[in-house]
Image (cartoon, grey):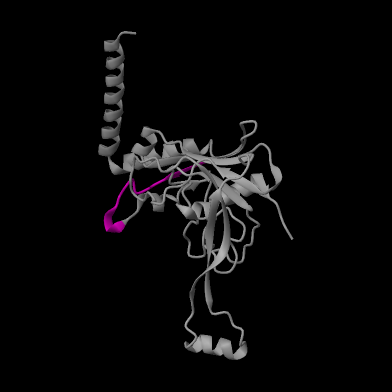
Amino acid sequence: MKRTTIFALALATLLSTTAATVSAQNADPKTRLQTAEAMFAERCKTAGEFIHRTAEKVEGIFLVKLRPSQKNFAEQFSLYDPYGDDVGGDGYIQNFLRGRTAKGSISSEADVVTPGYRYVEAIDQKDGKRYRYTGSMKVVGRKDPNTPNNQISIKHNPNFDLNIYEFGLDRVPAPGPMPRYGVTYDDISTREERDYWIAGSSLKVIDLKTNEVMAERIGYMMDRGQGNISGGRSPWLLAARYACPNFPVAPGGNPVQFHQTRNFVEKVIKPKFEN
């Protein structure tokens, strides 16, 4: 194929995409929402959890990709996977580790204790090396012994612990071979879907020894406000209210995206319990 022909095809594709975007942006709000809802309903036909095989007594996992620290609340075309983005930065690693639901940990589900993995491994993008992460409760401060509540606690228990604890990470160069099971995610949105504020997500559990996809969760979400940011509105945050599969709902009525990744992964590669 001649270079001029390739250029012409690329230009035609660009112009077609641009025209579609302009058309979507300029559509009547009611018509635009109807189009978005129809597109979203069609995508939801392929959404769900698809578990092909599970594994028991897994001690550690490999995170193929880490989550960025920043969250995408309103960027329409940035492929940050807003559906699957439950926690970023070091919190994404901590979320998989044993002990995270202990008192004082990062978990908001204090009454739900899951075993977690003994370790998590990942590649540090800065140096390209593989590291092993474990977690433990660490002293980060000390309570004021002179406050009324602490005075009462000390009176009833002279050994009352005044330390303040948080769940923190420990990191060392990864010993031995890579864990057998890996977790990865992708934003599967198309430009047309993002034109209508629809985001698609793929979360996979992979047997890294055989390259088999053991399970996949496909999810979609849509902002019914179609990107409206008036009054400090966050389109992708509110899109969680209109998602498939649906997110659990907190007592206040808000959808809960936190822990979604670990909950799905633990259905597939089940952590090893230790007495």
Is 78 positioned to the left or the right of 265 in the image? left
Magenta residues, as a range? 218-232
Rendered position, 45 above or below 233: above
Is 69 positioned to the left or the right of 155 in the image? left
Which quadrant of the figure has residue 178? Answer: top right
Q: 39 or 111: nearer the eye?
A: 111
Can residue 51 be seen from the camera position used here? yes
Where residue 175 appears, as percent x and y from the top left, is: 61, 45
Rendered position, 176 above or below 138: above
Q: 103 or 33: nearer the eye?
A: 103
Q: Residue furthest right?
A: 275
Where residue 222 appears, as percent x and y from the top left, is: 41, 45
Q: 208 or 188: nearer the eye?
A: 208
Can residue 202 be seen from the camera position used here? no
Where residue 53 appears, as percent x and y from the top left, is: 68, 38
Which quadrant of the figure has residue 2? Answer: top left
Q: Residue furthest bottom?
A: 155
Q: Quadrant of the N terminus?
A: top left
Q: Residue furthest top?
A: 2
Where residue 158 appears, as percent x and y from the top left, is: 61, 88
> Residue at coordinates 27% horizontally, 15% vertically from top-left?
8
Q: Is residue 219 magenta?
A: yes
Count all numbered tags in the image, as a single digit: 0
Rendered position, 118 above or below 126: below
Q: Quadrant of the C terminus?
A: bottom right
Q: Is residue 230 magenta?
A: yes
> Residue at coordinates 46% horizontally, 59% vertically from top-left?
254
